[in-house]
Amino acid sequence: MSTDPRLFIDAPLSAGAAIPLAREDAHYLINVMRRGEGDAVRVFNGRDGEWTAQIAHASRKGAGLTVGEQTRPQQSVPDLWLLFAPIRRTKTELIIEKATELGVAVMAPVVTERTQSDRIKVERLQAIIKEAAEQTERLDRPELRDSEKLGALLDNWPEDRALIFCDESGDETDAAWGGARGRGQPMASALASVGDRPAAILIGPEGGFSPAERDRLRRLDCVIPVTLGPRILRAETAAIAALTIWQSTCGDWQ
């Protein structure tokens, strides 16, 4: 695999195209990676595949590339969404980074009754997505959607998309975490019914879903309640674990 630096460029790519670099990308190439005029770079834009490029000029005023030839045609990632309740800033950033690495197509913050914070720093998260896509050899950059309340999301849910509901609770209201009755299936077993359907994974806040939210989710035909094992996981751990199981069962790890 090439060791040349890799950049996401939001511009059309074709042989001979001249691409001016944003200040952040120029700083990364020249000051962090210590590259200069004539050095090789790889570029992608999520539409035209991956291309070689060369640093055409580099100075304190900026830098630019000249595109060479295509090295990989555009490829799609599995049609998987990750819906997650925002948590503390560093942990939300971890979810975003790892979901990008694990091949998610769409990420959407969801505000639940027990969500601790609905503040999302979009620019910061977009920068994390870009860096993770560059590092993991993806040919695209996943979409980050605006925050939405869970009720509104379910009101407009597409019927053909399976909603994999990570539900660690049971149905016994007087028992810790709802007891043993009514828990979801082990996720790997439950995914046998999903096949190649479009899917989304729903991860709740650290306090779990409210009884009303859980009841509504359980009544929807598209919802598949699953468990991630006998331990109660933190939200960021649950997201990583669920994505790993899905990719190894239904995704492009097979």
Image (tube, rainbow, N blue to C red):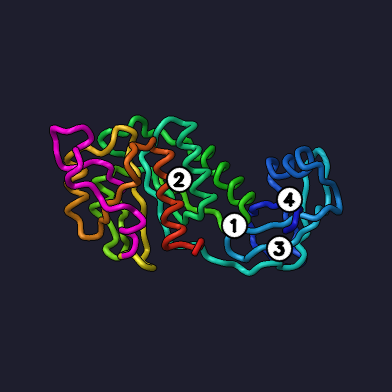
Question: Which sits in the foreground, 69 or 63?
Answer: 69
Circles 1, 4 touching at the beta carbon (< 8 Å): no
| Residue 138, label in figure | 1
The residue shown at (75%, 67%) is: 69
The residue shown at (43%, 36%) is: 120
Q: Amino acid at mark 3?
A: Trp
| Residue 240, label in figure | 2
Q: Nearer the viewer, mark 3 or mark 1?
A: 1
Q: Earlier in the sequence, mark 3 or mark 1?
A: 3
Q: Which residue is mark 3?
A: 51
The residues colored magenta run 166-192
Indicate yes or no whether the magenta region holds residue 186.
yes
Q: Amino acid at mark 1?
A: Arg
Q: Earlier in the sequence, mark 4 or mark 2?
A: 4
Q: Residues within 10 Å of mark 1 (few under 14, many from 20)?
A: many
The residue shown at (71%, 68%) is: 70
Q: Amino acid at mark 4?
A: Pro
Marks 3/4: CA–CA distance: 12 Å
Marks 4/2: CA–CA distance: 27 Å
Label 1 SS:
loop
Q: Nearer the viewer, mark 4 or mark 2?
A: 2
Q: Nearer the viewer, mark 3 or mark 2?
A: 2
Q: Does residue 234 lie above or below 161 as drawn?
A: above
The residue shown at (76%, 44%) is: 29
> In the rendering, at what x and y percent does residue 136 appear?
61, 52
| Residue 5, label in figure | 4
Marks 3/2: CA–CA distance: 30 Å
> In the rendering, at what x and y percent does residue 153 appear?
28, 50
